[in-house]
């Protein structure tokens, strides 16, 4: 939401062309008196709505008084990966849209080249356009290529064709995520992260080149998905830079 408004305010760009309609209340317009004119100047349709209408358009408990209508953001797998990605996030069988959105945001912050949401008919990938997922990305949904695939094997094949090393995040992994792993992390890498409750299934984990665990020095049983992803992705970002 914030990024969509920024695009509307800052002029033409590829991102701005994703925004088609802007609905806002009088209170929002009063806070930024130039917003409507700037949005219209780049071809965005603008309409004032009542607080009640804004609440009806939003699916949040406390709506912000502004709603934008945007194009969908996903692209094909080949387009998302490009020719020579160095760092890719793969969410395999992740079901919670809030967690998926947080990992997309973290991937953006860590400089990841693409995010792939993968799964099958039993563990369907999260819809990145789910409202909870969109909000959790805090705009990062629009910052990096994003693909959805029902075929984990096809995703792995595409990653290998681009020379990426596949690392599976696993609590019982044989490789420890510490400085001794820097040489491994410095190579072009795709991280595979599994579901919140069970991690990667045996099939997906078996496709990886290495199974990597984040060391736990205290008494916690495990890390949640978003935290583990942040630790892993930033370790790769540091090693690659």
Image: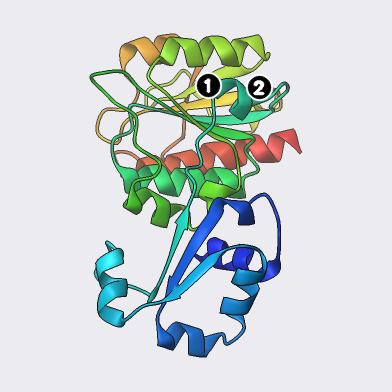
83 displayed left or right of 61:
right
Query: What residue lies at 50% left-to-right and 16% top-to-bottom?
Result: 155
Dot 2 corresponds to which residue? Answer: 184
Q: Are marks 1 and 2 in contact (CB under 8 Å)?
A: yes
Q: Is residue 241 visible?
A: yes
- Tell me residue 11's x, y (percent): 70, 65
- Farthest-out residue, bottom: 30
Name which of mark 1 and mark 2 comes first in the sequence.
Answer: 1
What colouring style does the render use? Answer: rainbow
Secondary structure state at the residue bearing disc 1:
strand
Query: What residue lies at 35% left-to-right and 10% top-to-bottom?
Result: 203
Query: What residue lies at 50% left-to-right and 36% top-to-bottom?
Result: 74
Circle 2 crowding by C-alpha within 10 Å: few under 14, some 14–19, many from 20: some
**Is residue 154 shown above or below 107?**
above
The quarter of the picture where the C terminus appears is: top right
Q: Quadrant of residue 183?
A: top right
Q: Is residue 217 visible?
A: no
Residue 87: numbered disc: none
């Amino acid at each position: 939401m914030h990024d969509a408004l920024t695009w509307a305010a800052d002029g033409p760009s590829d991102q701005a062309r994703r925004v088609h309609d802007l609905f806002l209340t009088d209170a929002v317009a009063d806070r930024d008196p130039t917003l409507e004119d700037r949005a219209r100047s780049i071809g965005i349709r603008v309409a004032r709505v009542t607080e009640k209408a804004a609440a009806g358009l939003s699916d949040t408990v406390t709506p912000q008084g502004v709603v934008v209508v945007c194009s969908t953001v996903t692209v094909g797998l080949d387009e998302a990966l490009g020719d020579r990605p160095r760092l890719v996030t793969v969410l395999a069988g992740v079901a919670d849209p809030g967690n998926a959105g947080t990992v997309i945001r973290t991937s953006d912050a860590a400089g990841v080249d693409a995010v792939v949401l993968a799964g099958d008919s039993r563990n369907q990938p999260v819809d990145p356009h789910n409202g909870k997922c969109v909000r959790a990305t805090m705009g990062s949904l629009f910052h990096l290529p994003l693909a959805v695939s029902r075929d984990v094997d096809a995703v792995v094949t595409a990653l290998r064709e681009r020379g990426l090393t596949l690392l599976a995040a696993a609590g019982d992994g044989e490789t420890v995520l510490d400085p001794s792993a820097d040489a491994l992390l410095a190579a072009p890498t795709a991280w595979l992260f599994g579901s919140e409750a069970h991690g990667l299934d045996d099939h997906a984990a078996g496709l990886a080149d290495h199974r990597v665990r984040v060391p736990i020095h205290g008494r916690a049983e495990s890390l949640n998905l978003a935290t583990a992803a942040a630790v892993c992705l930033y370790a790769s970002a540091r090693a690659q830079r």
